[in-house]
Image: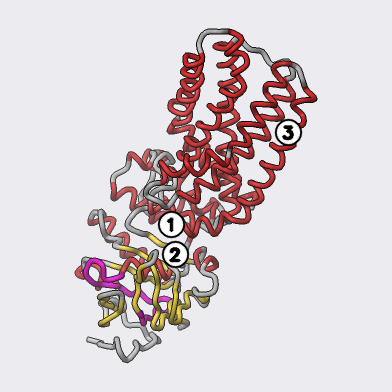
Amino acid sequence: MWRDALLIAGKDLRIEARSRVALWQVLPFSLLVLILSAFALGPGPSTLHDAAPGLFWLAVLFSTVLATQRSFAIESGEGTRDGLRLSGVDPAGVFLGKTAAVAVQLALLQVALWAGITLFFGVRLHVIWLAVVASLLATVGLAAAGVIYGALSAGLRVRETLLPLLVLPVLAPVLLSGSEVWSAALFGHAAAGESWLRILAPFAVVYVVVGIVLYGPLQEAG
Amino acid sequence: MPAAVHLRSAVALAGRFPALSGVDLTVSAGEVVVVLGPNGAGKTSLLRTCAGLLPVTSGAAEVLGEDLRQDPTHVRLRVGLLGHAAPLYDELTAAENVRFAVRAAGLPTSRVDPALERLGIVGRLRRTPVARLSAGQRRRVALAALVARTPELWLLDEPHAGLDGATRRLLADLIAEAAGGGAAVLLSSHEPDLAVPLADRAVTMTGGRVVDEQRGGRRPVLEAVPPSEETAHVA
């Protein structure tokens, strides 16, 4: 399973490095979400400061949808979809590999968004370790949930429009918890943020376990 | 010779619709069988069923000794399917695609170079992303992946499509070599002039069933399993 996961993650990341869809489409999109949200909220520094964590995670959530769609677009051809089923790769390995590849992209994206809110919103994190731990846990959960729902909608003609409808409500706990932890990290209230980590950690674990168990049937149904 | 494919009254579904409506077919190890028939006859569905990609809902279906109705996943690693669409990733090079197929099957990557060279994918061609290759070249890369994996059952869906004369001759050699090595080959074709001379037997499908069978142009199979009574029509 782990060997297969490495193989799939390496393949997906190599394809992303060549196509640069994440760099030229997902990243500009997420930065646009930040900037347009700032325009909508107005120029007040305190408003932007207070809204920064929520906008950061909103941009991450939308980007998760795009990254997941891209991950399954790679396998959207009849030949590659059948090829993967015939390849001998363990479905759990496919799930973990795709999750890892999406997670790496989301992690890099968050670094860019972090720089973006620092630059545009003038905010600074006071408890960096808390924000980093929250981001790592959230990234695993977002990638795992995204890949599960991506597989669920992969074989459908309406997958591009269905995926956001399916996955965004499911990711709401990450939006809420991530925003709270990052608010705590911004204002230096570490204790307040730690309690929200108790939502992010189980979310990640549950979706990884569910994906390992269910990805095989989902792949067959797709 | 043991039967590589043994279907009796096999019914398979594509989604909710029947793709095979009671197929009777036996293919022995080392035998080459071509499947002919009009569009929608069930040729592709037959190959996909033998690959374990379509669920068999009734009848008997054994491939390489594995019961497809129990768990088709074990069969998949032992068959090689070349469908209409080549199972290739556009952004990866020809060599990277073949290497991925070999590593996914848990085979040594030392198989990659000989397979690419066998299909004439050398020099700059092997380093070119397959998105930039012609349809025929992509077909050759997909065939190289198949050659590298050395499946026990070759399932070739319209394998002549998009190939030039030299590659068609190479394909004929590959099929003969695979059968000579004990693998069974089941290929579908719209071009009987090209396919039947390669085969030991030719079967014709209509409406998801095998309705006719005749001898092919290849050397006779000594211990071929005789066709069923309802489909037998040896020319």
User: In this figure, which residue is indicated by the disc labeled 1?
Assistant: A82
Q: Describe residue A175's horizontal placement relative to residue A184 as left or right.
A: left
Tag 2 subunit: B
User: In this figure, which residue is indicated by the disc labeled 2?
Assistant: B53
Quadrant of the frame with the N terminus of chain B: bottom left
Are the numbered discs 3 and 2 placed on the same chain, yes or no?
A: no
Neighbour tally class for label 1: few under 14, some 14-19, many 20 plus, Cα within 10 Å:
many
Q: Of the residues shown, which amino acid type is indicated by label 2?
A: Leu
Image coordinates of residue B30 in percent, x first then y, are 41, 76
Is B101 situated above or below B234?
A: above
- In this view, the residue in front, B214 or A106, is A106
User: In this figure, which residue is indicated by the disc labeled 3?
Assistant: A197
Asked if residue B225 is among those painted magenta in the image, a careful observer would answer no
Q: Secondary structure at mark 2?
A: loop
Q: Of the residues shown, which amino acid type is indicated by label 3?
A: Leu
Distance between mark 3 and mark 2 Cα atoms? 42 Å
Instruction: Name the residue rendered at 51%, 69% in the picture.
Output: B72
Residue extending farthest to the left is: B193
Distance between mark 3 and mark 1 Cα atoms? 39 Å
Q: Secondary structure at mark 1?
A: helix
Region in magenta: B22-42
Image coordinates of residue A192 in percent, x first then y, are 77, 25
Circles 2 and 1 in contact, beta carbons < 8 Å: yes
Instruction: Name the residue rendered at 29%, 45% in the picture.
Output: B134
